[in-house]
Image: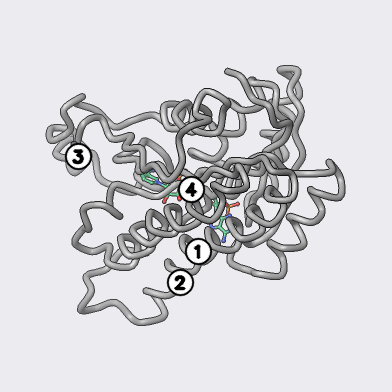
């Protein structure tokens, strides 16, 4: 895949979808900045694995909900490399509960981890990338942000917000050649969905036209395309990656 930019920051890349995005983009020749919150060991192991394949990687730990820490992390990268060409706002959590039992703090915890972190990253990206008149951002939302889901009012609101935020940033970034797109994965096999029982997973899989959960690698491939030069005329888009579950 063709990339005019040289480096990328992926938030929440210590495991799951984020780690697969890092592997994909490193294999495509980008220097990848692997962000983690608590998974320092996983992030270091990923860096070692990427370098063993001949790729370039660096590890940067910060909590993406912490405004100051995120801004400082961004600055560290720009100071080291001169600029940042690509960002993937991937960090995310769930904390499921029926709305009638959900405390306001539990609602806000998920909004902060998913939506606030995406805002901070997008804001820092549009500033840095506007200067260079080049850049692309992909925000990892979710099918739940399109459909809603019982037990996930906090998660659905955060992911729906990310889709709307992406379109607003796309409008602000377009005059400066900075593209913003979102992806909305369906059920992907990672730690986030490993908590579901086998029975529940089978029931969900039956409703997916492609008949199975997606792999993190398959999400990473779509994100690589949206960041790449091949998607140079695509901005403000929400790309579904869900095996046909929502058409
Ligand atoms: P995962 O395996 O649980 O990984 C989540 C990652 O996010 C971890 O690396 C974690 O870092 C990081 N993270 C969480 N909060 C953070 C914070 N405040 N600051 C920095 N990093 C933070 O989840 P996943 O399935 O790969 O999910 C990745 C993204 O895809 C999420 O945004 C999720 O909502 C979205 N998604 C997933 C699915 C699915 O079916 N799996 C479907 C749709 C959308 P540490 O471990 O270092 O703390």
Badges 4 and 3: C-beta atoms under 8 Å apart?
no
Residue at screen point 27% across, 67% down? 153
* Kind of element beneath mark 3: loop
- The x and y percentages for residue 13 are 59, 43
Give the mark nearer the N terminus: 3 vs 1. 1
Respond yes or no on whether mark 1 lies under 8 Å from ligand 1: yes
Badges 1 and 2: C-beta atoms under 8 Å apart?
yes
Q: Which residue is mark 3?
A: 246
Dot 2 alpha-carbon crowd within 10 angstroms: few under 14, some 14 to 19, many 20 or more: some
* Kind of element beneath mark 1: helix
Badges 2 and 3: C-beta atoms under 8 Å apart?
no
Q: CA distance from mark 1 to mark 4?
A: 13 Å
Q: CA distance from mark 3 to mark 1?
A: 25 Å
Give the mark nearer the N terminus: 1 vs 4. 1
Q: CA distance from mark 4 to mark 3?
A: 19 Å
Q: Which residue is mark 2?
A: 109
Residue at screen point 57% across, 18% down? 1
Q: CA distance from mark 2 to mark 4?
A: 18 Å
Is there any visible trace of residue 194 in the rendered image? Answer: no
- The x and y percentages for residue 168 are 45, 58
In the image, residue 34 sits, relative to residue 154, either above or below, namely above
Residue 139 circle label: 4
35 with respect to 157 (left or right) = right
Give the quarter of the image for residue 182: top left
* Kind of element beneath mark 2: helix
């Amino acid at each position: 895949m063709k990339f005019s930019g040289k480096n990328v920051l992926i938030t929440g890349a210590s495991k799951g979808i984020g780690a697969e995005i890092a592997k994909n983009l490193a294999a495509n020749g980008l220097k990848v900045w692997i962000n983690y919150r608590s998974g320092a060991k996983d992030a270091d192991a990923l860096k070692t694995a990427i370098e063993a394949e001949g790729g370039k990687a660096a590890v940067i730990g910060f909590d993406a909900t912490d405004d100051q820490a995120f801004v400082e992390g961004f600055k560290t990268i720009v100071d080291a490399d001169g600029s940042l060409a690509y960002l993937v706002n991937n960090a995310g959590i769930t904390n499921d509960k029926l709305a009638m039992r959900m405390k306001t703090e539990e609602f806000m915890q998920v909004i902060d981890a998913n939506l606030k972190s995406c805002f901070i990253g997008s804001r820092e990206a549009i500033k840095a990338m506007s200067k260079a008149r080049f850049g692309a951002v992909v925000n990892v939302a979710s099918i739940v942000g399109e459909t809603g889901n019982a037990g996930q009012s906090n998660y659905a609101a955060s992911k729906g917000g990310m889709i709307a935020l992406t379109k607003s940033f796309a409008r602000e970034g377009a005059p400066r050649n900075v593209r913003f797109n979102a992806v909305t994965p369906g059920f992907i096999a990672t730690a986030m969905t490993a908590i579901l029982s086998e029975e529940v997973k089978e029931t969900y899989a039956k409703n997916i036209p492609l008949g199975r959960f997606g792999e993190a690698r398959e999400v990473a491939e779509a994100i690589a395309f949206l960041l790449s030069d091949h998607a140079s005329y695509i901005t403000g888009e929400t790309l579904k990656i869900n095996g046909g579950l929502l058409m």
